[in-house]
Amino acid sequence: MKNVLEINNLHVSFQTYAGEVHAVRGVDLHLEKGETLAIVGESGSGKSVTAQSVMRLIPSPPGKIKQGEILFEEKDLTKVSQRDMFRLRGSEIGMIFQDPMTSLNPTMTVGKQIMEGLKWHQKMNLSDAKKRAVEMLRLVGIPLPEKRVNQYPHQFSGGMRQRAMIAIALACNPKILIADEPTTALDVTIQAQILELMKELQHKTETAIILITHDLGVVAESAERVAVMYGGKVVETGRVEEIFNRSRHPYTWGLMGSMPRLDWQQDVELHPIPGSPPDLFDPPKGCPFADRCPHAMHICHEEMPEETEVSDSHRVSCWLEHPQAPSVSGENNNVK
Ligand code: SF4
Ligand code: MG
């Protein structure tokens, strides 16, 4: 299947008064046409920063893409001009955030906000754009769209604002939609409706979705593939069933609480894992999970394991899976 997006060796840092935070450290990811890729991990794992890099929404300074490429239709998004990026955002790549209140403009009607993109990117005239705005509101399930189109965000409920945001993001039929915790702020029933809606629209438009979430129930419901991030790196990636039923990484096992489990259709929050994530001011030279990993060996603290291929679609970065790992009984193998 053709990739709509390819991220190669992405490094992103933030300069702070206390030093440089290495938030994303060599991320490789790809997104296939029409699929949903979930990125999961604790906060601070680099998942939002990765997504913001695709949109070039890293505040700079203090943030900076230090290395790597983000390929979209043969263009490297780390290199395109601000002007081209403005064109791509909203027309080719849409984004929805956790809290629509911070990204919807409170002084503009919802209809106008949908029309903005259509006017700028699709050069639609006013009456066509207005028609399309009403159509989009209807599509995302907002009742009385002819009336709602003229209302302001504060006149919408939380769930409706999230729907409005999806309408804005999808109005120009983007090839990619980035959804960062899109349903976290909503109650469970509305959450399910919004996810259902995203899936439905995805089928119609063939939009590929990057879904950032800490909710494994949402992943099980919505994604085809999963990337697990930890300490600024992707530590495991695979199809949903591979990650949920045949995970090979101790961090993923920790997230899931236990392995394997087959009852993923419920809402499962990420399981808390004892210890804290690595210091990204001074990232460890070895496996980022080594300080918290119950299986850590000497080599884990010394060297980052290269990626091992478990199947065509399943990859893991862990010394337990590495063909060159010391044998489990070897004397180098003691926990730190
Ligand atoms: Fe644990 Fe070592 Fe695997 Fe890291 S590489 S997850 S420390 S076993
Ligand atoms: Mg986040």
Image (tube, helix red, strand yellow):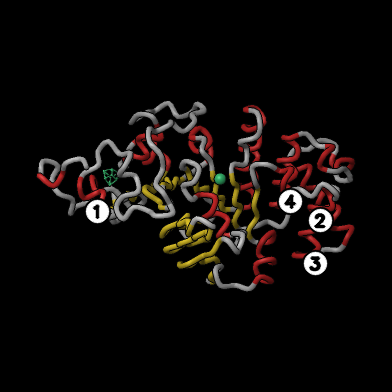
Label whose residue precedes the other's in the sequence (4 or 2): 2
Please tell me how crowded label 3 is: few (under 14), some (14-19), or many (20+) other residues with Cα within 10 Å.
Answer: few
Q: Where residue 1 sits: x, y (%)? A: 46, 58
Front tag of 1 and 4: 1
Q: Secondary structure at mark 4?
A: helix
Foreground label between 1 and 3: 1
Which of disc 1 and disc 2 is earlier in sequence? Answer: 2
Residue type of the residue flagged with mark 2: Met
Left or right of residue 288, residue 99 in this image = right
Disc 4 crowd, CA 10 A, few/some/many (<14, 14-19, 20+): many
**Residue under numbered circle 4:** 168
Q: Are marks 3 and 2 in contact (CB under 8 Å)?
A: no
Mark nearer the N terminus (3 vs 4): 3
- Residue at the spot 34% in from the left edge and 44% down from the top edge: 289
Disc 2/disc 1 C-alpha distance (Å): 54 Å
Point out the quarter of the image occupied by ligand 1: top left
Residue annotated with mark 3: 123
Please say whether residue 78 is visible from this viewpoint.
yes
Q: Amino acid at mark 4?
A: Ile
The kind of residue tagged 1 is Glu
On the image, the x and y values in percent for residue 284 come to 34, 52
* Residue named by callout 2: 115
